[in-house]
Image: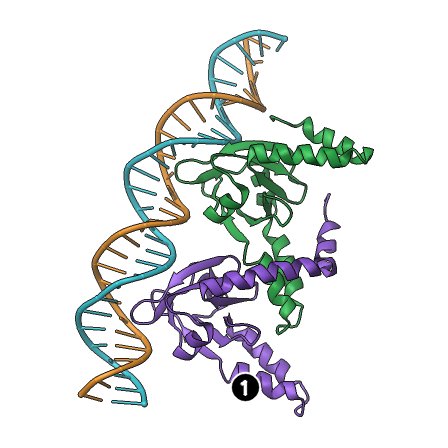
Chain colours: A green, B purple, C cyan, D orange
Amino acid sequence: MFISTYENKLDKKGRVSVPASFRSYLSNLGYNGVICYPSFNNSSIEACSQDRIEKISSAIDSLNPFEEKRDYFATSILAESTNLQFDSEGRISLSPKLLKHAKIKNNMLFVGQGQTFQIWEPTAFEKFKASAIKKANLNRASLKWQKHLNNQEGK
Amino acid sequence: MFISTYENKLDKKGRVSVPASFRSYLSNLGYNGVICYPSFNNSSIEACSQDRIEKISSAIDSLNPFEEKRDYFATSILAESTNLQFDSEGRISLSPKLLKHAKIKNNMLFVGQGQTFQIWEPTAFEKFKASAIKKANLNRASLKWQKHLNNQEGK
DNA sequence: TGGGAATACATGGGAATATATGGGCTTTTA
DNA sequence: TAAAAGCCCATATATTCCCATGTATTCCCA
């Protein structure tokens, strides 16, 4: 499972280390890379294992091949996803398109989300958390959950 | 699986490189080429593996011979399909007819769609993508795969 | 339990390889 | 016989491989 938060930075060649614990989870699933795509909901990059995106693909594929809906889903999900392989040091190269979506310049946060993780520009994540907390004020249960996340800051 | 998008260009001889990752997927299936035909939903060129077009063909066969759709599919897909072999550098030559259908002059986008991919004139794709994302969002609620994936969280 | 040694990890950069593209030459074909 | 297609090699750029280094973490033993 992807848990905890890590901050790493782009090098001059545009590479970034994927946190070792995230890599080892993927490696246990038999993968030496990760699927990345822009989030639909916010300015982060979403990341997941290959089999997860394959499930999405087969769900799309079960639609009639001539149905227009099929194109819409495939275009908004599969066309935007890239399979990034780890180099021998466990790094990936994020495309300029993904970096732009997330407004990442140098530093980025790897935020574990269980079966997926997200990559955030650090200050954007702070803002996101702040607004999430506001919304959570309506709901104590989710407020607790947010506090839990806060405790992991800086790790 | 075909995922991600790549932009390549026609050379003076009318050749274009098929993205290496797309080629390698086809090569793993045992093919050294790709089937192309004009999409009838939009102005792109559809591309898939040989065995997929065979499945489509048998699906068409199973339609009632008097059904209107049958002729439509048979003529617009099978009759228009061409099997394009890769040259030793992984390039194909798209027919003038296909290029005209997609309004491609020099640059083109290879857009992964899972079991198939599409070839688009870049600005035409941008327009299509914008509407695809809107329509996919409207239909998001009906996406069974999302629920399915959510249930797996916490594993 | 303290502290030095060993290991793991993130980062840096030169060298080798892969990929997209260009173009000459031969072969096929219409 | 001209045009198209295939075959081969060249090249610029991008990507990957491999090794090095500094730092943080873990291990192990006195």
The image shows residue A120 at horizontal and vertical percentages of 57, 38
Front-most of residues D27 and A143: A143
Residue at x 55%, y 48% (from the top left corner): A36
How many discs mark residues in the rendered view? 1
Q: Chain of mark 1?
A: B
In the current view of this chain or complex, which residue is farthest to the bottom? B66
Question: Residue B35: where, in percent of width, then height?
Answer: 48, 74
**Residue on which the image places disc 1:** B75
Quadrant housing residue B85? bottom left
Identified by mark 1, the residue type is Thr
In the displayed structure image, the side of residue B61 where residue B10 appears, left or right: left
In this view of the protein, can residue B72 be seen by the observer?
yes
Residue B67, image x, y percentages:
67, 89
Q: Is residue A44 above or below residue A146?
A: below
The residue under the point 64% across, 64% down is: A60
Q: Is residue A39 left or right of residue D12?
A: right
Vertical comparison of A81 with A68: above or below: above
Quarter where residue B105 is shown: bottom left
- Residue at image coords 59%, 78%: B56
**Where in the figure is residue A27, as x and y percent of width and height?**
57, 44
**Quadrant including the N terminus of chain A:** top right
Q: Is residue D16 left or right of residue A100?
A: left
